[in-house]
Image (spheres, rainbow, N blue to C red):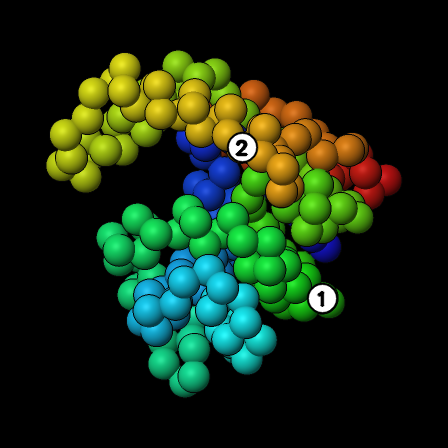
Amino acid sequence: MIITIDGPSGAGKTSLAKALAKKLGIIYLDSGALYRAITLEALKRGFDKEHIITSLLPGLKLTIKIDEKMRLWIKGKEITEEIRNPEVTREIWWVCRIPQVREKVNNILREYAKDRDVVVEGRDMGSVVFPNAPYKIYLTASLEERARRRYQELKKMGKEANFSEVKEAIEERDKKDSRRELAPLIIPQDALLIDNTHLSIDKTIDKILAFINRNEN
């Protein structure tokens, strides 16, 4: 069983995916972690775009292990925590826009999900990576609510934040995601559309479970 969760920034995809996977007793796959792993390796080697394509990707082997969370290894070294470094966060944007990188990540996700029950979230999971997934979810919320969530998240992390600036940044991200040439953000065909502006995670999960049950019968 493959469940995909797509949607815009700030919709709560990651929290929902983790909670849903735990509820169903299946695997949560973090697509973003794979992009971070490639970015980390590129930074370590000092690679630019051309070298990533020609030298890094062909021989790169990422090992995924799942216990309480998804863990990643490269060449026998665990990098699960290292990929969260601020430097990776700053540089990932240009790495994940390389078509060959997206193809690499998509192939890793498809291979791992083969013969496994997984929940996977992102911006093109149901539209591009797993277009034949039996259960596709498109999660969204109002711009105001998504900005509020991000603002509160930043404040909890002790970071300075301006609500108007946070809202503007998310709105700009929405435009870029929906207009990009490579795998734009769209509502996948046959997806269940959920607006969780006023829904808790538990209520959102209830809607998804009802959707799965309807499609199983």
Where residue 41 appears, as percent x and y from the top left, is 38, 70
Name the N-terminal-most of marks 1 and 2. 1
Side of 93 where 7 appears, left or right: right
Which of the image's four quarters has the N terminus? bottom right
State the SS at label 1. loop
Which residue bears the numbered disc 1? 114
Q: Quadrant of residue 212?
A: top right
Q: Which residue is drawn at the image coordinates 49% and 26% (left, top)?
A: 174
Q: Given the image, on which type of amino acid does mark 2 rest?
A: Asp
Where residue 108 appears, as percent x and y from the top left, is 61, 66
Side of 204 where 110 appears, left or right: right
Q: Tell me if residue 209 can be seen.
A: no
Q: Tell me if residue 179 can be seen.
A: yes
Q: Which residue is drawn at the image coordinates 43% and 84% (left, top)?
A: 75
Where residue 53 appears, as percent x and y from the top left, is 54, 66
Closest to the observer: 99 or 125? 99
Crowd tier of the residue under label 2, counting other residues whose Cα lies within 10 Å: few below 14, some 14–19, many 20 or above: some
Q: Quadrant of residue 184?
A: top right
Q: Given the image, on which type of amino acid does mark 1 rest?
A: Lys
Q: Which tag is nearer the camera, tag 1 or tag 2?
A: 2
Q: Is residue 154 above or below residue 70?
A: above
Which of the image's four quarters has the C terminus? top right
Separation of disc 1 and disc 2 at Cα?
28 Å
Where residue 205 appears, as percent x and y from the top left, is 57, 35
State the SS at label 2. helix
Side of 133 where 59 appears, left or right: left
Closest to the observer: 118 or 200? 118
Closest to the observer: 20 or 170? 170
Which residue bears the numbered disc 2? 177
Q: Which mark is residue 145?
A: none
